[in-house]
């Protein structure tokens, strides 16, 4: 009798473990599918983290309606569209993609990507003023202290050119109440918007154009 009870208990335990593993596998499959759907179709779904909303209101004073135009060619200039952002001091390298916007001009961001808007027409053939927004995290920039005054930010393009910008100011604000107005400048500018979506805080770094280098040779 004792032996039969032991065999029966082992069978029940084995079935329980199998059931739990199947449930875990199912949950993981759904999670992977929803995140893949978000990434492919740029849609924000509940319980998925690949794409999430980013607060655009603080930057409304800096973003003209023309920045949302479908054809950005007049703002890109002659050296190509942005593809990669680098911060050498922290070994940060992340892909850049056009902003994901909704009909009411709110923003969404992938968890591993910086998204950009070109705010002005091209300046002397170079990129117009560039706004890059991203979600703070280990797949982008996990520590705002990576953004320091006099630090360099590099933007590579799809034509093999690299823009170098130097940070002139770093500031912090609350997403719900803050506002940022980018001043006009003859030189190109980059405004980096790093948003912590869990705390609702934003770190902004304003940088000025320094040089352009051909890295495709």
Image (spheres, rainbow, N blue to C red):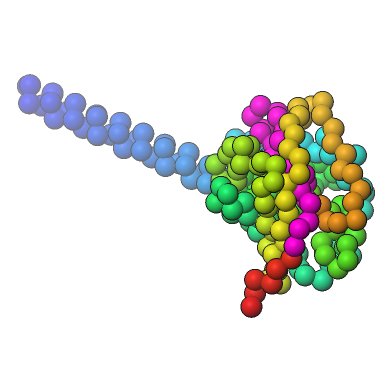
Q: Is residue 79 magenta?
A: no
Q: Is residue 83 visible?
A: no
Residue 203, position in %: x, y? 71, 35
Residue sitting at the far top? 2
* In the foreground, 146 or 179: 146
Magenta span: chief secondary structure: strand
What residue is rendered at 59% in x and 53% in y? 88
What residue is rendered at 56% in x and 47% in y? 90
Residue 58, position in %: x, y? 83, 34
* In the foreground, 31 or 49: 49
The C terminus: image quadrant: bottom right
Residue 89, position in %: x, y? 58, 49
What residue is rendered at 88% in x and 66% in y? 124
Residue 124 falls left or right of residue 214: right
Q: Is residue 195 magenta?
A: yes
Region of the chain picked out in magenta, as a range = 190-211
Examine the rendered structure and indicate whether residue 59 appears above or below residue 88: above
Examine the rendered structure and indicate whether residue 113 appears above or below residue 25: below
Residue 170 falls left or right of residue 3: right
Residue 27 falls left or right of residue 90: left
Q: Is residue 212 visible?
A: yes
Examine the rendered structure and indicate whether residue 91 appears above or below residue 217: above
* In the foreground, 84 or 106: 84
What residue is rendered at 71% in x and 58% in y? 164
């Amino acid at each position: 009798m004792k032996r039969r009870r032991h065999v029966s208990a082992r069978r029940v335990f084995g079935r329980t473990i199998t059931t739990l593993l199947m449930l875990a596998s199912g949950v993981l499959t759904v999670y992977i599918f929803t995140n893949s759907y978000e990434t492919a179709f740029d849609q924000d779904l509940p319980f998925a983290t690949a794409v999430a909303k980013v607060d655009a209101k603080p930057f409304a004073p800096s973003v003209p309606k023309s920045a949302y135009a479908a054809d950005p060619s007049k703002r890109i200039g002659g050296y190509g569209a942005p593809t990669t952002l680098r911060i050498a001091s922290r070994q940060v390298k992340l892909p850049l993609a056009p902003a994901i916007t909704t009909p009411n001009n709110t923003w969404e961001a992938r968890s591993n990507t910086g998204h950009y808007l070109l705010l002005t027409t091209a300046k002397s053939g170079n990129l117009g003023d560039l706004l890059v927004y991203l979600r703070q995290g280990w797949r982008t920039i996990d520590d705002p202290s990576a953004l320091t005054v006099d630090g360099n930010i590099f933007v590579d393009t799809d034509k093999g050119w690299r823009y170098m910008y130097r940070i002139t100011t770093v500031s912090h604000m609350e997403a719900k109440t803050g506002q940022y107005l980018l001043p006009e400048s003859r030189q190109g500018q980059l405004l980096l918007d790093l948003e912590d979506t869990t705390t609702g805080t934003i770190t902004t770094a304003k940088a000025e154009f320094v040089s352009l280098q051909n890295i495709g040779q």
